[in-house]
Image (spheres, helix red, strand yellow):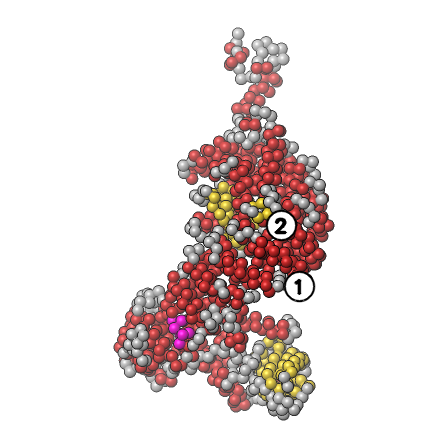
Amino acid sequence: MMQFMLLFSRQGKLRLQKWYVAHPDKLKKKITRELITTILARKPKMCSFLEWRDLKIVYKRYASLYFCCAIEQDDNELLTLEVIHRYVELLDKYFGSVCELDIIFNFEKAYFILDELMLGGEIQETSKKNVLKAIAAQDLLQEEETPQGFFDDHGLG
Amino acid sequence: MYPYYESDWSVLPPEANRRFNPAFNMATIKQVVNEAIERVRMPTPMRLRDLIRQIRAARTAAEERSVVNKECAYIRSTFREEDSVWRCRNIAKLLYIHMLGYPAHFGQLECLKLIASSRFTDKRIGYLGAMLLLDERQDVHLLITNCLKNDLNSTTQFVVGLALCTLGAIASPEMARDLAGEVERLMKSPNAYIRKKAALCAYRIIKRVPELMEIFLPATRSMLSDKNHGVLITGITLITEMCENSPDTLNHFKKIVPNLVRILKNLILAGYSPEHDVSGVSDPFLQVKILKLLRILGINDADTSEAMNDILAQVATNTETSKNVGNTILYETVLSIMDIKSEGGLRVLAVNILGRFLLNNDKNIRYVALNTLLRTVHVDTSAVQRHRSTILECLKDPDVSIRRRAMELSFALVNTQNIRTMMKDLLAFLEKSDPEFKAPCSSSIVLAAERFAPNKRWHLDTLLKVLVAAGNYVRDDVIASTIQLISESTSHQGYIALQLYKALSEDLQNRQPLTQVAVWAIGEYGDLLLQAPPDEEHSIQSPTEEDVINIYHRLLWSPQNTPTTKQYALMSLTKLSTRFSSTNQIQQVISSFCSNLHIELQQRGVEFSQLFGKYSHLRPALLERMPPMEVVRQPDDTLHTNGDLDGLEPHSEESSPQHVPSESNALLDLLGGSDDLDIIKPSSVPSKPTSVLNTNNQDLLDLLGLGPLGDSTPVANDTTNNMDLILENNNANLLPVMSNQNSNFLTDDLFSSGNTETEIKSIPPLTAFEGDGLQVVFSFDSAKENNTATINVTASNHSLSTMSDFLFQAAVPKTFQIQMLSPSDTAIPSNGVVTQVLKVTNPGQNVLRMRIRISYTVDGNPVLEQTEVNNFPNELWE
């Protein structure tokens, strides 16, 4: 089971955090800080896996963003790379060639997409099409309940 | 007219702005004014994207903090005002602020209010906030449980979806119990979107509260026949969790193996399906999950394993390997093949896949291969040996994770045949490796050398190289074992002393362990050093006394050396005083330490100086050379030649104090697993009387009360006051003295116990066992001191054949301590006897019970007898 997923920039700024296990806020921050420092210190030619406490850390860099997942000992680290890749593909499809700014300004969408791909730390949908369909339908629900022209004012803006 | 009522002056809305309105009274004015004020005080809140822009525009951390604090203050105030129109936007901003690391717990309740709203936008942000701001430790859970319950019954699938997603992320045990019924109902929903989410929710619920598993069982089974991949993969995830949860469920699900095989077969045979295809591989996510479940179902079950052999072979041979995704599946397949009871051919196939992985360009694949080989090396060493050169090559990989794995794997592959070549690589690795590797790597080299060294000379050279290459990172166990080895290899002492002298004359600032070993050896074998034949190969000439003492001068006054090293050096120099002729010079050096600022060094200075003055007649005897320290290696050592790790482990434990209890536990199991028994294993090979104590150093330590058991056998008190002990360093070379003293003491004890013990009462002997021509009789010497009784075991063979491999073992309750000395022989000839001495300490004055086990071989047939002795005479302890 995936324990958590972190997205952070090359400057070490956290862009997304999804925790599938309960930790106090303080511990989450400590883990995040520790992993960001460790991973940013690694050289590009190093492998994508780290042994960290009793977990396996799988990370991959896409442009300026690092995607980092913590999985348990009996999980397949190569498959986790595929999960990360799948998530990137979904973001790319949704935003249309995604960049870091898309994720900063629409972080809630990034969460929504992740929540259609994974649930409780496990993969729930292996079809890209189905994930995007579900997201589009929910976006539509949101638009329908907001009066025309008022969206800018009443939505998240 | 009053200018007040001009329309463009007015603060009132147009419909209230009438010049002469009859309804225009004070009450209306008040209300309108209030509304206007409200609108001014509560303007439209800043948009999320504007806030993000502002925060990003902040040039310093302080500036960012001030923007955030201002916005947080504003958001708090809107929460207080119960502003429901903008709540959604404010929470979204708060979530962004939370991600930056600022506190946002004050938004928790507002999230619940959003969830309770009927608008989908509110719910979507509310649930997102709940997942981010709450976790299962929060007290607001009762409230959220109610919200979730409502939404799980919603008619909009996406509302149900949001609720399931949140439950899956933050379910606490209480929530799991309260909502398990709802989730079970949704697992049977006709809507696949809801079914798959409910399945993963059930998975999380079982993880939290395993006993809730029962209610999900029926709904889970039907998920396997689903066509939707989302439902299939979540269903398989759920079943996997259930199987890992309870062995009963695991057995229950064994019958689904054919279904799983069919699904997997369809996947790999199916043509291109754009929806689930990942670079030419059909739904790798689902394939991996199925392979993992197959592994769990097939472990230790020959029939089930048989049923999946074919499909595993098919996946292993048919998977496209040019991309990561194909290797992902192969990796999972290899794991399954290795774990289940698969056919031999399939295992070879699996190891070969890993061998191919090792040559892959992708470092991730190489890492995984090393990791997996490390797991399988015990099962099939020879197959892994074939990839040895590739593995050694990985020691030079730029990636630290790969290097670590390669190091571990290399040590697992060392054996008598390849040790010379492998050590070259490993020593080169040790020299260049990062500090974090040096300690474990040097200890592992020492262990490997100990087990597989082709000869003593090579072994000594290797240890020397380790000390040089690892410098200060060497652990203490390496020092101890090097010293022990030098002492043991009597024919090489001159040679090694010369080598160490050579090393010592070079720069050693950061090689304290090497310095310690070197001065120990020079001190012991100083005379041999002077006569050592020069080493032509390295052009080392044997030094003069002058040279050696100069080096000691340098060592003792160098601020770089630690006090421990200097203690070694002082002790060593004192020893040299009887081996060298320049005693006066040595005396000068030592007496100069009488006023050293370091208390340990000063004490040594004072003590050793005594040996040059008043007590100089004692000096030669006290400083005699140590007898060789022999370590009786564990009998199974010689059996391991292939270098699997099993053999290494007991070795590494040997140096840790936990070793002894674990051994006695193993014996407890042997003897029927009674927990209240304590046992000591006798050495199965009778040794010379001078080394009556069995096996390893650890036992010697135990006896002196230094070991983990803190034995207070009489030996302890006798030896600690001994002069030699004071003279010795309290470090690693404490060991030799103890072994020396112990043996002497015990020899006395064995052979002259009659003289020392004055009060011997005669206690009638006791027959502990009789049968098949074997009679075991206990006779007793009672000793008052320390509550220790000596039991002489006499085993006599009344049969006509010889009993060979005779082994007597005894176990006593934990309140007792038992010590077994070596038997007089391992074979009892016809009408012959074997004797053995047991010492039982009874600090609690309890009634002694003893369980004994006797094994021997007669005419090639092994015999095993076991019995309990309860009728020990009461006089034993009186």
Q: Are marks 2 and 1 on the same chain?
A: yes
Tell me the kind of residue under disc 1. Answer: Ala
Q: Residue under label 1, please give it.
A: B302
**What segment is highlighted magenta in the picture?**
B457-464
Q: Please name which of the two marks, 2 or 1, marks the residue nearer to the observer.
A: 2
Estimate how packed mark 1 is, as few (under 14), some (14 to 19) or many (20 or more) residues with alpha carbons within 10 Å: few
Q: Position of residue B181 (x, y in %)?
A: 71, 46
Labelled disc at residue B269: 2
Q: Label 2 vs label 1: CA separation?
A: 26 Å
Left/right placement of residue A32 relative to residue A120 reads: left
Q: Is mark 1 on a helix, strand or loop?
A: helix
| Chain letter of the residue carrying label 1 | B
Left/right placement of residue B389 relative to residue B122 reads: left
Residue ID at (49%, 47%) = A60
Residue ID at (65%, 91%) = B800
Number of numbered discs overlaid on the protein picture: 2
Estimate how packed mark 2 is, as few (under 14), some (14 to 19) or many (20 or more) residues with alpha carbons within 10 Å: few
Residue ID at (49%, 53%) = B364
Whether residue B589 is visible: no
